[in-house]
Each structure stands twice: as structure tokens, then as C-alpha cells.
Image (cartoon, helix red, strand yellow):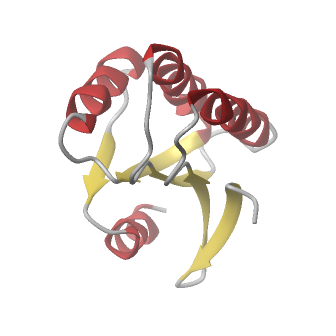
């Protein structure tokens, strides 16, 4: 299954960036680059985005790639949510927010995030 894919929730289309469970920073960077390509093919201010980083492992390079992804996506996104922000990931999450100057709302579950996203678009 594609990690970067569109899902439907309550009649709305959400772009899922599923990096959950990824343990290889190199694989994460490859997938993040693919996500950038998918987003770049969309209309500006058109996307509802859910990013799942549950149980993923990061290093400095993959964290930098996430920052660049968030900054790149800004013109294309109406609303963005993230799940999987626990423990030390909170520090990485804050770094992404500061770098990208975006409001990405954190949730405990995918369903909660999707429910919120559909109210935003």
C-alpha cells in the first residue's frame, strides 16, 4: 500500500502521509520526497493533510526532510493534522512548526484527526 495516498472520510478527500513504523531514515527521506511530488501536483489551498509519524524513528537528515516537507506544502494545504507525537517526537514536532511557520494540529488518533480535518475543508 502506498504510504502517500488519498483517503476518503465523511465525503471529504484527505491526503494521508503515512510514515508510521518507519525505522530507516533513508527510507523516510525517500518517502518524504515522494510526498512532496504528490503535493506539488495539487491545486493551491486545496489539501486536507494527515501525517502519521507513530513509531517512526528519525535522525537529523530525516527531521530536516520533514521540515522541508512542511514548508513546501504550505501553499497547497487548507488544514493539516499529525498523529504519533509522543515523547521526544514533541521536540521534533516543535522544530517542524517553527521552521515551516505552519499550524499543524496534533491528535492522539487518526480518526480524531480525520474528524477535525473534515470540519476544516
- Residue at 50% x, 29% y is 70
Residue that sits furthest to the front in the current view? 23
- Quadrant of res 100: top left
- Residue at 43% x, 37% y is 57
Q: Picture coordinates of residue 77 (x, y %)? A: 55, 43
- Give the left or right position of residue 28, taking residue 56 as reference: right
- Give the left or right position of residue 27, taking residue 77 as reference: right
Q: Picture coordinates of residue 92 (x, y %)? A: 30, 27
Vertical side of 95 occupied by 27: above or below: below
Q: Nearer the viewer, residue 107 or 64?
A: 64
Q: Nearer the viewer, residue 17 or 121?
A: 17
- Residue at 49% x, 54% y is 20
- Quadrant of res 1: bottom right
Q: Picture coordinates of residue 90 (x, y %)? A: 21, 36
Q: Nearer the viewer, residue 12 or 63?
A: 63
- Quadrant of res 120: bottom left
Amino acid at each position: 500500500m502506498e504510504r502517500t495516498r488519498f483517503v476518503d472520510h465523511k465525503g471529504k478527500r484527505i491526503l494521508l502521509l503515512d510514515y508510521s513504523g518507519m525505522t530507516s531514515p533513508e527510507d523516510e527521506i525517500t518517502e518524504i520526497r515522494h510526498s512532496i511530488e504528490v503535493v506539488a501536483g495539487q491545486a493551491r489551498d486545496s489539501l486536507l493533510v494527515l501525517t502519521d509519524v507513530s513509531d517512526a524513528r528519525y535522525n537529523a537528515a530525516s527531521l530536516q526532510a520533514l521540515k522541508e516537507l512542511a514548508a513546501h506544502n504550505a501553499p497547497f494545504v487548507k488544514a493539516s493534522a499529525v498523529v504519533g507525537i509522543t515523547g521526544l517526537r514533541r521536540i521534533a514536532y516543535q522544530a517542524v512548526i517553527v521552521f515551516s511557520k505552519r499550524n499543524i494540529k496534533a491528535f492522539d488518533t487518526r480518526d480524531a484527526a480525520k474528524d477535525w480535518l473534515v470540519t476544516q475543508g
